[in-house]
Amino acid sequence: MKIALVIKDYSLKKGGLERYVVNLSRELINMGHDVHVFANLRDTPEYSGITFHHVPIIKFSFILKNFSFAVNSRRLLKQNKFDIINGFSRIYPLDVYRIGHKVRRHLLKVQYPNRLTKILKYLSIKHLTILYLEGQVFKKKNHKKIIANSELGKQHAISYHAVPENNIEVIYNGVDLDKFNPQVKGLYRDKTRKKLGIKKNEIVLLFVGRNFKLKGVKTIIESIPLLGQGKEKVRILIVGKGKSSYFLRLAKKLNVENRIFFAGESSQIEKFYAAGDIFVFPTFYDPFANVCLEALACGLPVITTKMNGASEIIKNGMNGYVVEDYTSPDELAARITDILPKDLRKNMSACAFETAKEYTPSNNAARVEKLYKNILKNK
């Protein structure tokens, strides 16, 4: 098949969605398909067989950036004939749209619970732009199938955009086990911890992500004074792009500022998974945070919330815990305390890797390929 994958940033350095598309494109090439990537940014090395098409955008404003990407993608796609067009950014029309971004109407609901604030945000240029583009993508005439990467994402597509249930395929993410696996600890753990000033007997709570506010960094910091036995050994490592000033002030107020380290972004994220002991991700909302799958693959028990689609592969007490109230530092502290004993962490670490082994890029690509073939039959 001749396949077009459309995403604004084709990158291994950005978020989980971008890394997913890079991995999918390579798997599809290995399966013998003719793969074309349409993107504005590419910061990955050339991969044999993948044809890259640069999509220009107007960068002067948010609205122009998003609309110009959608318009220019459509223009470039029309210059070629493809068996399947799979979109990951908000463009239309296409054959398959994979919900990688958050469903904006639900995001506004959880991010701005105050009614007046929510109304004002709805009226902002940024949100109006995304709401419009998202609404167009989900219209029946603009797609043949929707891929949701979790049951949570599927339900949001149904409830917010009235997408028929039989038009949505749930395909969980895959994780690159060559890059993310328990062996990274032997390769990078001691060096990374030494560089960060973390002692061997200290327990590292690792967070990886952008948008610290939405992903629950505040809840992590507030949970530290509430931890039970063993809390004196706990350190927090925050990896990702975001402003740290507010969170450092909060940590100072709670007298835990000496336990927190903001490491910034990294293209070698596996080194930080190697340095961690427990992965903590109390997000307010994520369709499926791929960082949780990466952490599991590296042997880290994962604590996340029920508002994360990745919680669907977490088994309480086995490979991690699912927190019911994403705003509760007390509940998060209780679950962290449960995993502090070394023997328990060791058992959960083994179970974490066993879970991740089920979700490989090749398994994911095989299911995506099957969906493509079914669509092509009915074209």
Image: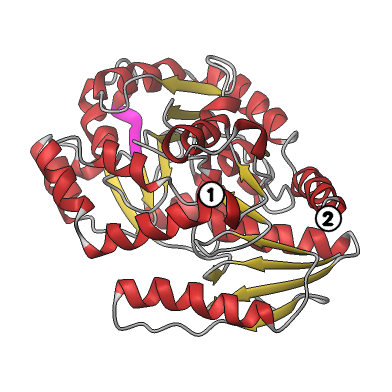
- The N terminus, quarter of image: bottom right
Q: How is the rendered protein coloured?
A: secondary structure
Amino acid type shown at disc 2: Leu
Dividing the picture into quadrants, the one containing residue 10 is bottom right
Q: Name the residue under label 1.
A: 190
Q: Is residue 199 magenta?
A: no
Furthest-front residue in view? 141
Depth order, front residue of 116/284 = 116
Q: Is residue 43 visible?
A: no
Relative horizontal placement of residue 16, taking residue 216 as reference (left or right): right
Q: What stretch is highlighted in magenta?
A: 232-236
Q: Is residue 376 above or below residue 374?
A: below
**Horizontal and vertical percent position of residue 143:** 62, 54
Disc 1 crowd rating (10 Å Cα; few below 14, some 14-19, many 20+) is: some
Whether residue 263 is visible here, answered yes or no, is yes
What type is the residue that disc 1 sits on?
A: Asp
State which mark lies toward you, 2 or 1: 2
Residue 4 position in % (x across, y down): 71, 68
In the image, residue 31 above or below residue 155: below
Magenta stretch, main secondary structure, is: strand
Label 2, on which residue? 376
Give the residue displayed 56% in from the left and 26% down from the top. Answer: 312
Secondary structure at numbered mark 1: helix
User: Which of the 4 image quarters holds residue 64?
Assistant: bottom left
State how many labels appear: 2
Measured as percent of width and height from the top left, residue 252 is found at 12, 43
**Residue 235 lies in magenta, yes or no?**
yes
Report how far apart the C-alphas of labels 2 and 1 lie in the structure.
50 Å
- From the viewer's perspective, tell me whether residue 86 is left or right of residue 136: right
Query: Label 2's element?
Result: helix
**10 Å neighbourhood of mark 2: few (<14), some, or many (≥20)?**
few
